[in-house]
Image (cartoon, rainbow, N blue to C red):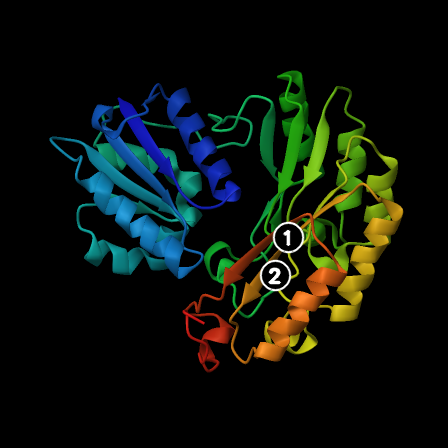
Amino acid sequence: MKIFMLSLGCVKNQVDSEMILGLCKKENIEVVGFPQEADILLVNTCGFIESAKTEAINSIFELANYKKGNMKLLVCGCLAQRYQEELIKLIPEVDRFIKIDEYKDIAKILTETLKSSYQYKENISPLNRVYITAPYFRYVKISDGCTNRCAYCAIPLIRGDLKSRTIESIVEEVKMHVKDNVKEINLISQDTTKYGFDLYKKHTIVELLKHLCAIEGDFKIRLMYLYPNIVSDELIMFIKENEKVMPYFDIPIQHSEDKLLKLMNRRGTKEEISNILKKIRKEIPHSIIRTTIIVGFPHETKEDVNNLEEFIKENPFDRLGVFTYSCEEGTSSANMPQEISEKE
């Protein structure tokens, strides 16, 4: 049995793909690099914004063209989670849509879909993956889901509320990577700064970092996806004082203007964001700061955009991504007047 997988979307989705492939490999399903060589075609989809949904659907149709004989086409991920019923009607070429909620039963789903006499029994695990990354770095997903409820964001609709892994399980995984001579550990989640709040009733990212920094070995840790108003003094000082943690701050601010931040249901203000950025620059002058911005959100004006440009000049970022607003059904901003054209 051979499987070809196409993994779309973010690196959090990529980790899910790596775990699914790890399960397949453990069940003696060979991973191949070309769809025409496979018995199973699997697409792990993104459903975050409209352009990602379009890419996912086009990719499914493209792989469907390779189907012949007993070949099976499976679709999993965020698009399948959010639109399973609609997709079943839209794309009958797909043999099975697998929701994220069903990943724990994926061995059973494989058995049923492939109509196999062999019973697939393995469970997916972060300790058993087929890595898509280069051998010197790994992504370690420390939690899934989100409780922030930003007005534009569909993640809670897809992934649900925050679900953190235990400190012990993350330490076990990182030890495994370090033993494999991995040099860069990238901690990822929807909101890394809120890690552990569901389990330990407090923000536990610094506590996790203490445990990871205690692991012996030549490696570095990078934090991704930090929510601005909970980038605490404790976190900044820990990064400053511990060489194993890269001085890299990935802080998506989304906008600078208080009016827009409030409409986006973002916590914090323009002044607070500026103070955090200045504090990082003061304490760790050689730090790298990355952010993302959304433009075209409902009720944004030219004055807001001009003010945003001035804010960026006053608070220069080392890496900056700017995205046009995507109106997503089910989010609270979808009920706002969509008055700014895509062209503008």
| Image quadrant in which you'd find residue 211 | top right
| Image quadrant in which you'd find residue 34 | top left
Q: Residue 247's x, y, as percent?
A: 77, 40
Q: Residue 92's x, y, as percent?
A: 17, 50
Look at the image and tell me whether residue 99 can be seen: yes
Vertical comparison of 209 with 296: above or below? above
Residue mark closest to the camera, 1 vs 2: 1
Q: Residue 86's x, y, as percent?
A: 27, 60
**In which quadrant of the rendered image does the C terminus lie?**
bottom left
User: Which residue does the image show at 75% across and 36% down from the upper left?
Assistant: 246
Mark 1 near mark 2, Cβ–Cβ under 8 Å?
A: yes
Amino acid beneath label 2: Thr
142 lies left or right of 93: right
The local crowd at label 1, few if under 14, some if 14 to 19, many if 20 or more residues have their Cα within 10 Å, is many
The dot on residue 147 is: 2
**In which quadrant of the rendered image does the N terminus lie?**
top left
Which element carries disc 2, helix, strand or loop? loop
